């Protein structure tokens, strides 16, 4: 893949996240990159104090560094900032983070040599992935610790994943025929200042949340047929009268999914129920609002992916090297909080549909807990409890992180975004949501199969057939953990959405 700085798309970024392969920058970016590097080199040899070029960092910015020590300054910066702790960042997220750093450096405002770009490209070409501990960033002054671990690998320090194992970076570079990068003036600072760690996690979570949202529309349609719910609330004019894009599109997708259902046709007349519970009737309004929220976050994150977020910056208009604050990840933190709300609410309404289906007083004649022999068998009783536990966990995790600033670095960095852990928690939330939707899938398929006199629509029957390839119907109690894990996988890997033929329904986009 060739990336054009300032013009990377969500589609490209998702491909990077979900697959391996070489990534390079458009060579048209090189002149601007090299011009900025020459300006930094001249500043490093000059008399004026330039932050991070010939001064210390943070609270130590007033300490002047001699020209002969500028290379050592940058190396020391990287080694001292390798203070990450906790679990290892997934390789897919690290690759995305490195791609975002390429895009940022390629704008020609960071003052690094093309050799720095080439080293990142070489890591992609040789499939070398730095080991990056996931904890340690507060999302301001850049994602310093995580990006320092990435940069350390480029200079031959720390650890990497290479050819299926974890090894010292220096060893991997030697095997791959690469030399450790020797950092020039400002280059270490340019590599660790920036929001790429937070943004990579937020983008990864966005992609996973979108897959979950599409699956939720499918499982919601299946649940509606399982309880013999009404499709009248999905009629187009209802939603165009309100006007929200997500609501309109979710309603359209539900109409597509349920069109031709013999189950629906069987109770169009004579059904004494006037209205279904909100978890059925208000799916377009709730899931649609979540879709809109995800799209808002996507707009922010697409801009951030193409942004220059280190400091100081070389301004092309004047050649000046100016300190600013683009490293502050407040936009990413807000986007992460938006995604968290959407994930939590998609799960909350889906869990109520699960509760509806297992309750014989509400499910319109489905057997208790969806088992053909209740009493001797408990059916999906505890699967519903698990879905409730996961829903509750996600509600707690959805509390905002962006409002939780704390001063750091001797009060020099006195307001921070907390974008890093705001984005990291989303992966756990998405995993919980996939499992909630997996449980809904199991229950809804079982419920539809109890309607033996009629079949569901063609798309929903295809979904049930896909599920039954891996999970048999629950005729009597058995060890269920494996079924729950399988169903969650079918949700998260988009197997269910593909089986339903969602196709062009609900495309992420930002327009």
Image (cartoon, rainbow, N blue to C red):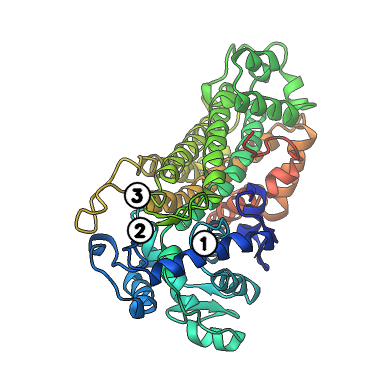
Disc 2 designates what residue?
137
* Mark earlier in primary sequence (2, 1): 1
Disc 3 designates what residue?
418
Q: Is residue 379 above or below residue 408?
A: above
Q: Closest to the observer: 466 or 44?
A: 44
Q: Residues within 10 Å of mark 1 (few under 14, many from 20)?
A: many
Q: In the shown orientation, is residue 404 left or right of residue 289?
A: left
Q: Residue at x 35, y 47 (%)?
A: 417
Q: Residue at x 54, y 54 (%)?
A: 480
Q: Which mark lies nearer to you, 2 or 1?
A: 1
What x and y, as percent, mark residue 83?
Answer: 32, 69
Disc 1 designates what residue?
36
Q: Residue at x 42, y 69 (%)?
A: 188
Q: How far apart in space, not on screen, are marks 3 and 1 (Cα)?
A: 30 Å
Screen quadrant of the C terminus:
top right
Screen quadrant of the N terminus:
bottom right
């Amino acid at each position: 893949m060739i990336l054009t700085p300032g013009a990377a798309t969500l589609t490209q970024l998702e491909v990077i996240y979900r697959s391996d392969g070489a990534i390079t920058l458009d060579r048209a970016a090189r002149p601007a990159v090299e011009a900025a590097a020459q300006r930094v080199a001249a500043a490093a040899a000059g008399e004026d104090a330039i932050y991070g070029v010939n001064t210390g960092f943070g609270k130590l910015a007033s300490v002047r560094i001699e020209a002969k020590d500028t290379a050592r300054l940058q190396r020391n910066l990287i080694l001292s900032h390798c203070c990450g702790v906790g679990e290892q960042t997934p390789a897919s997220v690290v690759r995305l983070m490195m791609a975002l750093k390429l895009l940022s450096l390629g704008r020609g405002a960071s003052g690094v040599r093309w050799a720095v770009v080439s080293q990142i490209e070489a890591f992609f070409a040789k499939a070398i992935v730095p080991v990056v501990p996931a904890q340690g960033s507060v999302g301001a002054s850049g994602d310093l610790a995580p990006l320092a671990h990435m940069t350390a690998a480029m200079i031959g320090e720390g650890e990497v994943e290479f050819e299926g194992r974890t090894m010292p970076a220096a060893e991997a570079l030697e095997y791959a025929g690469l030399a450790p990068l020797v950092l020039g003036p400002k280059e270490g600072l340019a590599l660790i200042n920036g929001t790429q760690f937070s943004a990579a996690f937020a983008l990864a979570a966005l992609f996973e949340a979108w897959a979950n949202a599409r699956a939720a529309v499918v499982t919601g349609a299946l649940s509606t047929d399982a309880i013999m719910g009404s499709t009248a609330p999905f009629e187009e004019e209802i939603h165009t009268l309100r006007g929200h894009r997500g609501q309109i599109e979710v309603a359209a997708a539900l109409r597509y999914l349920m069109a031709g259902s013999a189950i629906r046709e069987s109770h169009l007349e004579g059904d004494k129920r006037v209205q279904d519970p909100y978890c059925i009737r208000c799916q377009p309004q709730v899931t649609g609002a979540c879709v809109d929220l995800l799209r808002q976050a996507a707009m922010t994150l697409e801009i951030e992916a193409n942004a220059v977020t280190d400091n100081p910056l070389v301004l092309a208009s004047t050649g000046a090297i100016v300190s600013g604050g683009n490293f502050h990840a407040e936009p990413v933190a807000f986007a992460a909080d938006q995604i968290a709300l959407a994930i939590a609410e998609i799960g909350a309404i889906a869990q109520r549909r699960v509760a509806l289906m297992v309750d014989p007083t509400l499910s319109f004649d489905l057997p208790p807990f969806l088992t053909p022999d209740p009493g001797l068998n408990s059916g999906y009783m505890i699967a519903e409890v698990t879905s409730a536990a996961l829903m509750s966990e996600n509600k707690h995790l959805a509390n905002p992180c962006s409002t939780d600033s704390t001063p750091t670095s001797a009060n020099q960095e006195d307001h921070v975004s907390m974008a890093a852990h705001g984005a990291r928690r989303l992966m756990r939330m998405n995993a919980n949501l996939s499992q909630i939707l997996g449980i809904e899938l199991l229950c809804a398929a079982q419920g539809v199969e109890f309607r033996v006199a009629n079949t569901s629509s063609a798309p929903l029957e295809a979904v049930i057939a896909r599920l039954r390839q891996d999970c048999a119907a629950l005729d009597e109690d058995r060890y269920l953990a494996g079924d729950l894990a399988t169903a969650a996988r079918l949700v998260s890997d988009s197997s269910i959405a593909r089986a339903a033929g969602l196709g062009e329904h609900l495309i992420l986009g930002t327009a």
